[in-house]
Amino acid sequence: MHVLALMQKLYASERNIREAESPLSEEQIIALRHSESKPVLYEIKQWLADHLNVVTPSSPLGKAISYAYARWNKLSVYVNHAQLNIDNNLVENAIRPSVIGRKNYLFSGSHEGAQRSAMFYSFLGSCKINGINPEEWLADVLEKLPETKSPFKRKRS
């Protein structure tokens, strides 16, 4: 529970940075992380070191402590770089639709159906990233499609 409370302090500090009244400069972010997060990170590292040889290494907690302690420098590097986040949640949230889609492709009926589904996921994901309303985009494309000439000649079967 002690480490969890410390981690909550780290996330509270990051939330304060994100929710600041005006955007903070990189220097301000690093300064805040050094003053608020670095002491908390030191305390967590100290707790890990103190419990490294106390907890049974093969237990789930022992494995977690060993994993975190061995990678400590990489886990805490974000305090020195304003553009880094404390975790990778933003990336995981961004790729979640693709992962869910991958599971759904199993029910596409065929390989070609799965490819078409993947293509639509890509188009819709691109719309989202670029701030385009996918419904408006699709309506516009479908409206223009009949008059559009392809630069490629298709084989008729």
Image (cartoon, helix red, strand yellow):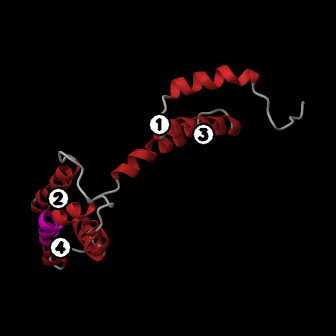
**Image mark for residue 108:** none
Circle 1 is placed at which residue position?
128
15 over 157 or under it: above or below = below
Magenta residues span 34-45
Q: Are marks 4 and 2 in contact (CB under 8 Å)?
A: no
Percent coordinates x, y for residue 51 in the rendering: 15, 74
Q: CA distance from mark 1 to mark 2?
A: 30 Å
Q: Nearer the viewer, mark 3 or mark 2?
A: 2
Q: Is residue 6 magenta?
A: no
Q: Residue at x 13, y 77 (%)?
A: 50
In this rendering, position of residue 60 left or right of residue 154: left
Circle 2 is placed at which residue position?
10
Give the secondary structure at mark 1: helix
Q: Nearer the viewer, mark 1 or mark 2?
A: 1
Q: CA distance from mark 3 to mark 2?
A: 38 Å
The amino acid marked with disc number 1 is Lys
**Mark 1 vs mark 4: which is more N-terminal?**
4
Circle 3 is placed at which residue position?
118
Circle 4 is placed at which residue position?
45
Q: Nearer the viewer, mark 1 or mark 3?
A: 1
- The answer to whether any part of residue 127 appears in the image is yes
Q: Nearer the viewer, residue 118 or 48?
A: 118
Q: Residue at x 13, y 57 (%)?
A: 9
Percent coordinates x, y for residue 70 in the rendering: 29, 76
